[in-house]
Image: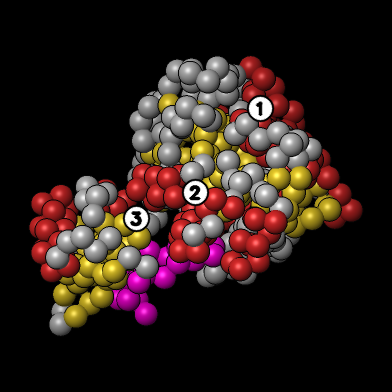
Amino acid sequence: MQLNEDQFAKLKTKFATLKEDSPFYAKKFDGIDLTDVTTQADFEALPFTEKADLRAAYPLGLAAVPDEKIVRIHSSSGTTGTPVIIPYTQKDVDDWAIQFARCFEMAGVTPQDRVQITPGYGLWTAGIGFQAGVERLGAMAIPMGPGNTEKQLKFMQDMQSTVLCATSSYALLLAEEIEKRGIRDKINLKKGVIGSERWGDKMRNRIKNELGIQIYDIYGLTEIYGPGIGISCDYDCGMHYWDDYIYLEILDPVTGEVLPDGETGEICITTLVKEGAPLIRFRTHDIARIIPGECACGSKFPRLGTIQGRSDDMMKIKGVNVFPKQIEEVLQEFPELSSEYQIHISHLEGRDTMRIYVETNGTVDFLEMADTVAREVKSKIGFTPLVKVVELGVLPRSEKKTKRVFDERYE
């Protein structure tokens, strides 16, 4: 995807004062005259911005505006290391709400809808972003926040919520609770706007079928506004992203080379109009591809494929590089297994061991299924894991993001 004329114009405007406005970029682009960036090749020669750069700028070193223009901060949801603080101006907050309202419009949400918001509020960008988008659109926001499933289900029934905003993990938990209680006929949900973590087709279909809703995959990250920079449409063939606010590249995760549209690699994002903390060529580590061509829905906004995982979630076991998605793809081959699984990696008696826990619907012999899954993993990945099949519902459900990989070698 090449920079178009409008994107280049916005970048040139940003570059004209970026080093003057931002000590962070004055240092990062030391020796580089940004006014010389006049071609695609010039832009692609600029250095990348990494998460480590943002952590090193803690607390407000990323700010490209005076303190009096900062109206809010947010922080990434990671639990380890120095947090990343992202400052927002009023324009940033307004621009984010505009993008989020577009997401709801793309999902067919209207002012007549009642939108139940379950992601967290506070430093995390999720809850407040969903709410701003709902209000910008003119629908009714029901700002529940995370947890308290009893209250969630009560409000879902009493308020007759029509749209659910949630992580995929919490959407699944709610779907299972609704099924257990036999209250699906009292639920009026029509749509689900789901995001914040990678989720496979099996989990997607369970949520869709058990809740009886159309689901839309929303994309975003705290460093780049937050969720709301892209969403899938009714045709469910990728996520449209707002290229008047962001420019997106796909990189080879190892070499950093820019890949052609259609090839899978690491998402790299540049903000075009962000004031508080503009980001230039920020490596997200999310893995996806740009989908060539126009969408059947008619939208002219380009499309990003489903997030396949992260370039930094690779596990090295017995000399083999393994991604969680590879295990998930094996498990999806068996209709008797649920969408829920865990991977535990340990180092015992001088060698690495992988244990996979997966749920079944109870229609198969647990030991036979475990052997079958182990053989299939061996054939696809190259080593044999220990597999334990458990009953449906045994593995923990999460009100936020589900942790699926536990690497006990470093504990």
How many numbered circles does the render carry?
A: 3
Is tag 2's residue or tag 3's residue first in the polypeptide sequence? 2
Is tag 2's residue or tag 1's residue first in the polypeptide sequence? 2
Mark 1 falls on what kind of element?
A: loop
Q: Quadrant of residue 34?
A: top right
Residue 396: say if magenta.
yes
Quadrant in the picture for the C terminus: bottom left
Q: CA distance from mark 2 to mark 3?
A: 15 Å
The residue mark sitting in front, 3 or 1, is 3
Q: Residue furthest bottom?
A: 349
Residue occupied by mark 3: 339
Point 51% across, 38% down: residue? 214
Tell me the kind of residue under disc 3: Ser
Point 26% across, 70% down: residue? 390
The residue mark sitting in front, 2 or 3, is 2
The answer to whether residue 125 shows anywhere in this view is: no
> Would you say 267 lies left or right of 7 here?
left
Is tag 3's residue or tag 1's residue first in the polypeptide sequence? 1
Point 43% across, 45% down: residue? 209
Q: Which residues are magenta?
A: 394-411
The residue mark sitting in front, 2 or 1, is 2
Q: Quadrant of residue 145?
A: bottom right
Residue occupied by mark 1: 244
Q: Is residue 229 above or below residue 200?
A: above
Label 3 Cα crowd, 10 Å radius (few <14 / some 14-19 / many 20+): many
Point 43% across, 34% down: residue? 305
Between 106 and 322, the residue placed more toward the observer is 106
Instruction: Identify the disc placed on residue 211.
Output: 2
Residue 101 horizontal/vertical position (percent) = 70, 36
Tell me the kind of residue under disc 1: Asp
Mark 2 falls on what kind of element?
A: helix
